[in-house]
Image (cartoon, rainbow, N blue to C red):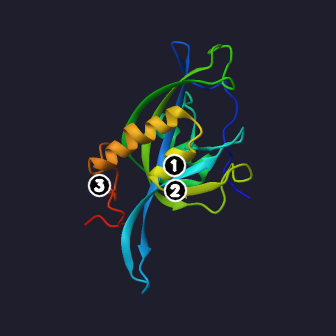
């Protein structure tokens, strides 16, 4: 059982011009495939997706940005609550607009949302996390993620934000804190 508790309710959510403000991320890692002798060979980039609780397909962690946190803090919190991962936000991927029937409320009657998405380099996968009983984690390649992504706006964040950043060398564009990498090379050292 997780000691962490997911935030619930919408009374502390942020809204702007009739849009509910959402924060999310595309968690990623590197792994190495092994050749027939058990030696590391190809470096593979994988992204982490979670199941939807309301239908088929996979999602990236995301949720409401609350009044007492920055958008970066909200994105990291959602990754922890929904996917049970901690890491470093490396790059702002963009703003993505969408409509949601399930997110209609008095402040956004049409269900309009604006998601701010980030790339999150995963450093820790928790064995226990707040939404563990409702969520299943799945590591997939970028092409696999594009195929199974439930929402078109998330696919856009993956293909036009994350993949482009990957193709451009994955250089950190967000302020680093102590002991963080300057670029995502998959190593856990600062040399």
Asked if labels 2 and 3 touch by Cβ distance under 8 angstroms, the answer is no
Asked if labels 3 and 1 touch by Cβ distance under 8 angstroms, the answer is no
Q: CA distance from mark 1 to mark 3?
A: 23 Å
Question: Relative to residue 140, is residue 16 depicted above or below?
Answer: above
Q: Position of residue 65 (x, y in %)?
A: 55, 31
Q: Which one is in front, 31 or 57? A: 57
Q: Residue at x 44, y 49 (%)?
A: 120
Q: Check disc 1: other Cα within 10 Å, few if <14, some if 14-19, many if 20+.
A: many
Question: Relative to residue 116, is residue 148 depicted above or below?
Answer: below
Q: CA distance from mark 2 to mark 1?
A: 6 Å
Report the side of 190 relative to 1 (left or right). Answer: left
Of mark 1 and mark 3, the one earlier in the sequence is: 1
Asked if labels 1 and 2 touch by Cβ distance under 8 angstroms, the answer is yes
Q: Position of residue 30 (x, y in %)?
A: 41, 62
Q: Secondary structure at mark 3?
A: loop
Report the side of 76 relative to 91 (left or right). Answer: right
Q: Which quadrant of the figure contains the C terminus?
A: bottom left
Q: CA distance from mark 3 to mark 2?
A: 21 Å
Q: Which one is in front, 85 or 104? A: 104
Q: Secondary structure at mark 2?
A: strand
Q: Which quadrant of the figure contains the N terminus?
A: bottom right
Of mark 3 and mark 2, the one earlier in the sequence is: 2
Report the side of 94 relative to 59 (left or right). Answer: left
Q: Which residue is mark 3?
A: 183
Q: Residue at x 73, y 49 (%)?
A: 134
Q: Which residue is mark 1?
A: 145
Report the side of 124 relative to 131 (left or right). Answer: left
Of mark 2 and mark 1, the one earlier in the sequence is: 2
């Amino acid at each position: 059982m997780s000691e962490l508790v997911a935030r619930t309710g919408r009374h502390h959510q942020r809204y702007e011009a009739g849009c509910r403000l959402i924060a999310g991320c595309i968690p990623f890692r590197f792994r190495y495939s092994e050749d027939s002798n058990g030696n590391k060979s190809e470096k593979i980039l994988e992204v982490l997706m979670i199941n939807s609780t309301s239908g088929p397909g996979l999602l990236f962690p995301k949720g409401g940005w609350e009044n007492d946190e920055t958008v970066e803090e909200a994105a990291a919190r959602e990754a922890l609550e929904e996917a049970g991962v901690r890491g470093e936000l490396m790059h702002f991927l963009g703003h993505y607009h969408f409509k949601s029937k399930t997110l209609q409320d008095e402040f956004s009657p049409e269900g309009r949302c604006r998601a701010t998405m980030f790339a999150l380099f995963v450093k820790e996968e928790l064995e226990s996390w707040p939404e563990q009983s409702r969520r299943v984690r799945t590591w997939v390649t970028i092409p696999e993620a594009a195929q199974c992504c439930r929402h078109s706006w998330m696919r856009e964040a993956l293909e036009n934000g994350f993949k482009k950043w990957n193709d451009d060398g994955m250089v950190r564009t967000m302020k680093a804190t102590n002991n963080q990498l300057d670029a995502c090379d998959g190593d856990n050292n600062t040399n």
